[in-house]
Amino acid sequence: MKGLMPTRISRREFLRLASIGLIGSATKLNPTGDPDKPIFYGRALFVYVTVYSRPSVFGRTVRLIGYQAIEPIYAKTQSRESGTQNPTWYQTSDGYIHSSNVQPVQDQPNRPVDVAAPHPGQVTIPFVDVYTQPQLSSHVLYRLYYSSIHWVQRLVRDSSGQAWYELWDDRFNSTYYAPARALRLIPASEFAPIAPDIADKRIEIDTTAQALTALENGRPVYSARISSGGKFAGPGGTVKDFRTPLGNYVIDRKRPSRHMAAGDGAADDAYDLPGVPWVCYFNGGIAIHGTYWHNDYGRPWSHGCINAAPLDARWLYRWTLPSASVDQPLATGPGTPVVVV
């Protein structure tokens, strides 16, 4: 992965980064459908998030949104300033939020279904707490976030009849419980290989441009903005170098879900991220994977891995070798070449 938790970045540092090239005119993208209905929601990723009067950090402050707050988003706005690494702003009911401040989410509860065998399930609401037992009076272990994926073991009901899914934690080989309405069981169709008849496939990752390109027979067929590993300030003026290693690799294993964690929880570079989705490993513990803890693609963010938007990561998971079916917690074998420059 390995991503820094968003709360580890100071507000001052965020403003310094966000102010680079994000000033000036913008082009408003019209939302689809009803203009009074949100196109999606934004989950605030920082201790507080500023709503500005215009798409610029030098706009007037309209209000502040607290951490984990859910904000309706009605349209997207793109900055035209040259050199902008992440030019996207989101329009709220009364102003603008820079896209790096919020995770795009939906609120789509599900009808619980019986589970005959372990099956990957994806969180489809902004967030949900998981418990040690299938009852709200038990201890909360984690908060799971929209687009994260978890292994659903079975459906159970508590004494009041409420449906819960028992989830398996692949890191600790333990189980916990989430209200079943929060997850959808991912159909096999979303694991079906893309272009399986193409033998010549390659992924090129440009860490300067912060971009990924998938090629078939030498021709680009898919591209995505990414966040590679970066260098970060440590305590006492030290610098921690987590830049993604350059070189030629191959994807050798894949997981639809992985609980990624490292470091002491008190350390400024520790992380604990259950349900990281669509993981394709290509260099030891370094992988391409989906990301739910930041939305700032175009800037280095991770501890070495390649962070991608969940939909981009899912496409790559299906397109790359080795192939993986819906019932495989782990697929192994020599696979698609990856070139990091």
Image: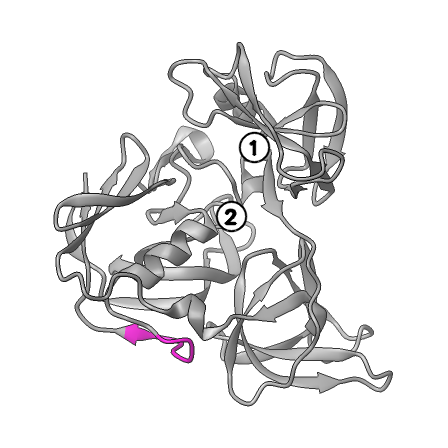
Q: Position of residue 264 (x, y in %)?
A: 50, 56
Amino acid type, label 2: Ala
SS at mark 1? helix
Queried whether the magenta region covers residue 125, the answer comes back as no
- Circle nearer the viewer, 2 or 1: 1
Which residue is situated farthest in the front direction here? 33
Q: Between 106 and 233, which is closer to the camera in this rendering?
A: 106
Position of 232 relative to 5 (above/below): above
Residue 213 as seen in the image, left or right of residue 16: left
Q: Quadrant of residue 285?
A: bottom left
Q: Give residue 111's position: percent from left, percent from top.
A: 70, 73
Residue beneath the point at 29% across and 30% down: 209
User: Do the residues under discs 2 and 1 have CB atoms within 8 angstroms?
Assistant: no
The picture places residue 137, in percent across and down from the top left corner, at: 82, 74
Viewer-proximal residue, 188 or 285?
188
Q: Quadrant of the C terminus?
A: top left
User: What residue sits 79% from the left and 78% below the top?
Assistant: 135
Q: Is residue 328 magenta?
A: yes
Label 1 amino acid?
Ser
Figure check: 156 above or below 341: below
| Quarter-of-image position of residue 100 | top right
Q: At 13% from the left edge and 62% from the top edge, which residue is drawn?
A: 199
Q: Which mark is residue 99?
A: 1
Q: What span is in magenta?
A: 325-331
Identify the residue at the far right of this view.
160
Mark drawn on residue 267:
2
Position of 133 with respect to 21 (left or right) is right
Figure quadrant of residue 286 = bottom left
